[in-house]
Each structure stands twice: as structure tokens, then as C-alpha cells.
Image: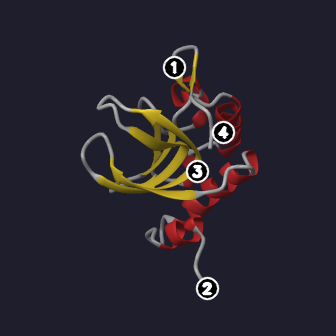
Amino acid sequence: MARSPAEEFLAGMPSERRPMAQAVHETITAAAPHFEPWLWQGKMWGGTDQTILAYGAYDYVNRSGDEVRWYLIGLANQKAYVSLYVNAVRDGRYLGQVYADRLGQVKVGSASVSFRKLEDLDLDVVAEMVKDAAANPPGNLV
């Protein structure tokens, strides 16, 4: 039997990170149960190949003029940490930046929240941020 995208992604995580990724996945799916997880694969901004467990999808035209399918929320395994991407904006700021002071001991980039241990991340605040993103997507979700 074929595995779901979430099962495939989680199975590919290093064993020490799998429980952390599972907990974040469960938080996202509880906060936005209408988002069917899917796998996004491609090159990220820094040119690295990534496989991201994505939630919510929307189409937009990038700087090159190409129409692409993007994700509202994404979960990725990086070399030294796990990243949660939230591609939603409020008042000109990415939601990760809006919630940064409440998320815990994390590193916040433009659309990313990176963490090394589950106890460094406040999952209640993640749930709140996911609900906020779901209510205010940057485009029409498909």
C-alpha cells in the first residue's frame, strides 16, 4: 500500500528528528485540518534541492514570469535543524516574524522558523500561527 505524503516525508527523517517532525505535523493538521499534506520538491532560494511537507497550495507568478504552485505552510529537514515555512503576511510582515517573540528559542528568517529541539518550539503558538495563515493566505488556495 502506498504511503501518504506525510508518512513518506516522516519516514525519510533521521530517527532522532522524526518525533519532533511528527509533533509539528500533528499540530499543523489539527490547526488546519482542511489542508491535505503534499510533497513539494525543488530548489529553494539558496539553490539547494529540498523536499518539503507542504500544507495548502496556491498558484502565483514568480519573478521570472513562470506560474508555480507554492505552499502556504511547509516543514523541512535541514542539515542542522528543522524549518517551518509560513508563507503568509500580516501588516507587511511574515507571520513567523509577527509571532517570533512567542515561538520559543527559534531562529526566524523572512518566512522560516528554524529549531533544533521540539522543546525549543511552542506548539500552541505554532497552532495559532497556522490558523492565522489559513485565514489569511497570500493567494487563492487550490
Q: Earlier in the sequence, mark 2 or mark 3?
A: 2
**Residue 119, disc:** 3
**Residue 1, disc:** 2
State yes or no: discs 1 and 2 in contact (Cβ < 8 Å): no
Instruction: Kindly indicate the quadrant of the structure image that contains residue 79.
Output: bottom left
Crowd rating for badge 2 (residues with CA inside 10 Å; few <14, some 14–19, many 20+)? few
**Residue 93, disc:** 1
Image location (x, y in percent) of residue 114 = 45, 43
| Residue 85 visible in the shown view | yes
Q: Residue at x 43, y 70 (%)?
A: 14
C-alpha separation, residue under disc 2 versus residue under disc 3: 34 Å
Name the secondary structure under disc 3: helix
- Which of labels 2 and 4 is toward the front? 2
Left or right: 129 in relation to 110: right
Outermost residue on the left side: it is: 47
Name the secondary structure under disc 1: strand
| Residue type indicated by callout 1 | Arg
- Which of labels 2 and 3 is toward the front? 2
C-alpha separation, residue under disc 1 versus residue under disc 3: 25 Å
Q: Earlier in the sequence, mark 1 or mark 4?
A: 1
